[in-house]
Amino acid sequence: MKLTNKSGLPDVLVKAIKNDNYTKGESDFSVTELLQPPRLRALKTRHFHEIEEDAEDKLYSLYGQLVHLLIERAAHEGEIAEKRFFAKFGNGVTVSAQVDSLSITSGVLTDWKFVTAWKFKGGRAADELWTAQLNMQLEILRQNGHDAKAIQIVGLIRDFSKPEARRNESYPQSPVVVAPIEMWEREKTQEFINERIKMHTASALSLPECSKEDRWATDDTYALMKKGQKRAVKLFTDKAEAEAAAQNLAQHFVEFREGEPKRCAMYCPVNKFCKQYQSTLKGADDDQNSGTVA
Ligand code: SF4
């Protein structure tokens, strides 16, 4: 993986990103890897030495690592903090999980996230993958002789706005949100882990497609517009409904807005090598989708 510095970030930050000593230890998969889309992970493995990532795109991940330093600093007796655990699944596949903190005294397993406010609309954790992640961690802990009575996410809201909190009740009311996470039956978690292992193992041989959720794709919409105004009066997902609304109003018309696979376009490190994404780009042709594009 090559790290670029297109925006000329200070050297200290670039070095800090470069010197990340993350390792999944002696495991076949980490929990984080299993939760990635299999196509993305397989392409990452295939093109590891060709992938370019820019330092600017790694900043939030770097800031997130600061949180883990704080957890280590606050660690105390009766707590397991910042430790990697290993467990075997299926046909002897080893999966590892990095645990942020397990309080032995209160029996609460906590994962910390440094995220935007929209991830906690209404005070609840909006990301379903977090539920899977925490339950997978718990299963691995159980196989190591530990247990928890509750699991939770502590969200540190990196873009918290006090005025917005005042205006909007469903916005996080504090820059720190503690959100309980649903605990799955053990059987469900074990099945989930085994299924993810199967998907990732198979993807090494034959690339699956990423789903709409994997691609963070938004829906196509039809915007009801008023002549002379830039902002939509209303957004519709149904074209006929939008056109009917426009017909009933003078000076109104419908504008088509194509949905966007946000992860593919802005956040996926392998988008350059991915035929599924490249083929959706305007002007994509056969040449573009040949060679190392898979
Ligand atoms: S570019 Fe999109 S479709 Fe391709 S691997 Fe990345 S997320 Fe999946």
Image (cartoon, rainbow, N blue to C red):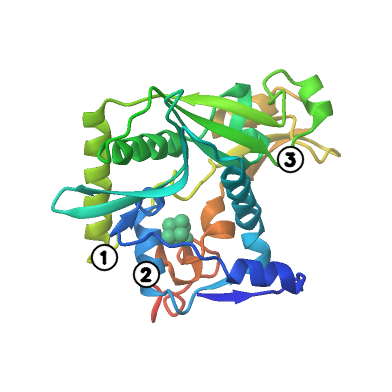
The residue pinned by badge 1 equals 204
As drawn, 150 above or below 261 = above
Q: Position of residue 70 (x, y in %)?
A: 63, 45
| In the rendered image, the vertical position of residue 129 relative to residue 52, given as above or below | above
Q: Earlier in the sequence, mark 2 or mark 3?
A: 2
Residue displayed at 23% across by 37% down: 190
Question: Can you tell me whether the CB of the residue at mark 2 lies under 8 Å from the nearest atom of ligand 1?
Answer: no
Report the front residue among 186 and 217. Answer: 186
Residue 253, compared with residue 66, is above or below; it is above
Which of disc 1 and disc 3 is earlier in sequence? 3
According to the picture, the residue beneath numbered tag 3 turns out to be 159
* Residue under pointer 2: 45
Q: Is residue 207 left or right of residue 291?
A: left
Q: Hey, which quadrant is residue 242 in on the image?
A: top right
Give me the residue at 62% from left, 61% from top: 58
Please rate how many residues cluster around mark 2, counting C-alpha atoms within 10 Å: few if below 14, some from 14 to 19, many from 20.
few
C-alpha distance separating marks 3 and 1:
38 Å
- Residue at 62% over, 37% down: 222
Report whether 125 appears left or right of 252. Answer: left
Depicted 87 relative to depicted 162: above or below? below
Q: How far across and down, in percent of the image, does residue 182 sit? A: 41, 24
Distance between mark 2 and mark 3 Cα atoms: 33 Å
The residue at the far left in this view is: 91
145 left or right of 217 in image = left
Residue neighbourhood size for the residue with mark 3, other residues' Cα within 10 Å, grouped as few (<14), some (14–19), many (≥20): few
Residue 243 visible, this angle:
no
For numbered disc 2, what is the local secondary structure? Answer: helix
Q: Helix, strand, or loop for circle 1? A: loop
